[in-house]
Image: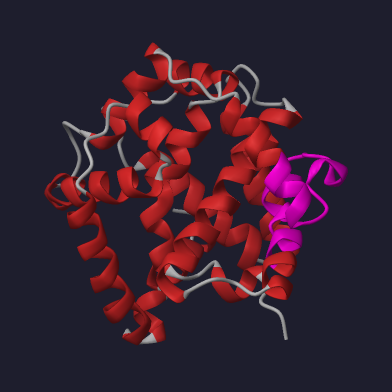
Amino acid sequence: MPLHIQDVSADAILLAGGARAILLQIANPGVGAGVAEHSDFANRPLDRLRGTLTYLYVTVYGTPDEAKAVARRVGAAHQPVPGANDAELQLWVAATLYETAMRVRELVYGPLDDSDAESLLADYAVVGTALGVPRALWPADRAAFDAYWSRCVDELAVDAAAAHVARELLHPRRGPLWLRLAMPTVRTVTAGLLDQPLRSAYGLPFVERRYQRLVRIVRFVYPRLPRWVRHAPQRHYLKAFRLGR
């Protein structure tokens, strides 16, 4: 039986790709300009993470009414951002979340078989359609997604605005101590998950040996953790949404 989005999205390890997804998003000039103008990574480094995770977990695991409510909340928050209602830009954001999630999952658990890959691609359309991206824009199969992804990646460019957001994201000056202590590892993982051209464009240092050591440790430890540990963020953010926090 093929995997579905509900089978994989609660895995906390997918959060390891969060910064990578953001750097891909803002390398699209249309997304990057809006984020640079309206996001405040320097003073509120966890806000974007909280908003994204709440949206994802409620969309995937909430009731239909809850999914509509969180989509309205995100839509209202993005309303002042230039390009927020551009379906092509929203499609790119959703595509980075899907592609990054699949890359991290395969890194930890091994390659997906064809039926799982196609099933998960179809399911992930909801990440974009919940915010108004027409279903017809989402690639119909993996071949179509790979073609779309290659075309978009070729058009990415790291301008000054994107580079500024990346510095604020990866070198936070504020926020809890645990976050700042975790950032060297986050930077290593993020650099390793990015393809070399984009890694270089952002000026991210990368030590292959350190990255591969981290990957080996995660592959050994993470799948052996209890399910309640691996799914802890999903429970936390879904509960917080339902309590109105």
Residue placed most toward the observer, 207 or 71? 207
Where residue 243 appears, as percent x and y from the top left, is 48, 61
Question: Is 128 included in the stretch rendered in magenta?
Answer: yes
Give the magenta-colored segment's residue range. Answer: 120-147
Q: Residue furthest top?
A: 160
Question: Which sits in the foreground, 111 or 15?
Answer: 111
Picture residue at 48% right of the left edge, 24% below the top: 35
Q: Is residue 42 left or right of residue 118?
A: left
Badge count: 0
From the top left corner, tell me how far across and down residue 3 is, in percent. Answer: 66, 77
Q: Residue at x 78, y 46 (%)?
A: 138
Question: Does residue 85 sit above or below 120 in this rendering?
Answer: above
Q: Is residue 92 above or below residue 223?
A: above
Q: Viewer-proximal residue, 68 or 216?
A: 216
Pick the front one: 129 or 239? 129
Left or right: 65, with 192 as reference point? right
Q: Is residue 225 visible?
A: yes
Does residue 210 show up magenta in the picture?
Answer: no
Quadrant for the N terminus, please: bottom right
- Which residue lies at the image location 65% right of the left edge and 20% below the top edge? 83
Instruction: Report x, y in % for residue 25.
Output: 52, 33
- Main SS, magenta region, reads helix
What residue is rendered at 72% in x and 25% in y? 86
